[in-house]
Amino acid sequence: MGQGDGAKHDGFLGAVYDSRSTTDVAALYDKWAATYDAEMAQAGYRHPTICLALLARHLPKGTAPLLDAGAGTGLIGEWLQIMGYPRVEALDISEGMLKVAETKGCYCAFHVLALGGPLPFADDSYGGVISAGVFTSGHVGAEGLDELIRITRPGGIIVLTVKNTLWEAGFAERVAALESEGRVSRAEETEPYVSMPGETGTTPSRGLVLRVR
């Protein structure tokens, strides 16, 4: 379900930011699924590319399985397959989005689930997690980190993007606490960047790589 970070948007993107429940978010993404790829390409959506670059820098080729948490229509899954990550599972709140992702033939499993609460996966299930455009307005906050850490193997990484307003509203403090507790180390943090240069009024985000300990 990953998408860009902005302040004022029309259409589906604006409605998603204004959503107040996971049911509303899922319904909106279900309706958006058919045109999502084209609209995000037109907006110059950067999150997937930045997340892929960060993951490739910090996680060896062939690591498996990976979890694409907020897979949407499968933009990242297609590229992970090309880059040599052979087993990727898709998780998204929107069944409609995952149906589009399934047509691309790049995922080995699909999970219609929301981040932010308990996940039905065993501890240490994944070698890495990638989550583009999920930790943002109307979606998931710092409460989603603990379960991603739990399901990632020690030595594995979690690559995510975080909207600046969320980062400044407690997310940075939560990451610092997780570091001080010895649960993760901060492998990399990008400078803030605009995720959708084709949209006006955007709020910057940053890319973050956490290595699980």
Image (tube, helix red, strand yellow):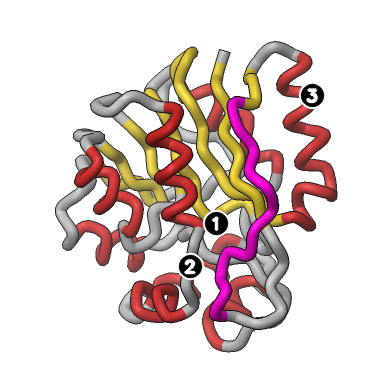
Q: What mark, if any, has residue 177 been given in the picture? A: 3
The residue tagged 1 is 133
Q: Secondary structure at mark 3?
A: helix
Residue 84 lies within the magenta run: no
Q: Callout 1: helix, strand or loop? A: strand
Which mark, by number, is residue 4? Answer: none
Residue at left offset 50%, top offset 52%? 132
Q: Is residue 146 left or right of residue 7?
A: left
Q: Main secondary structure of the magenta part?
A: loop
Q: How far apart are the alpha carbons under marks 3 and 2? A: 31 Å
- Residue drawn 69% across the image and 39% down it: 143
The kind of secondary structure element at disc 2 is loop
For discs 1 and 2, the disc positioned in front in the rendered view: 2
Where residue 61 sits in the image (x, y, percent)?
28, 28
- Above or below 171: residue 30: below
Res 123 seen here: no
Choose the circle earlier in sequence order: 1 or 2.
2
Is the residue marked by circle 1 packed among few (<14), some (14-19), or many (20+) residues within 10 Å?
A: many
The residue type indicated by label 2 comes to Tyr
Residue 161 in view: yes
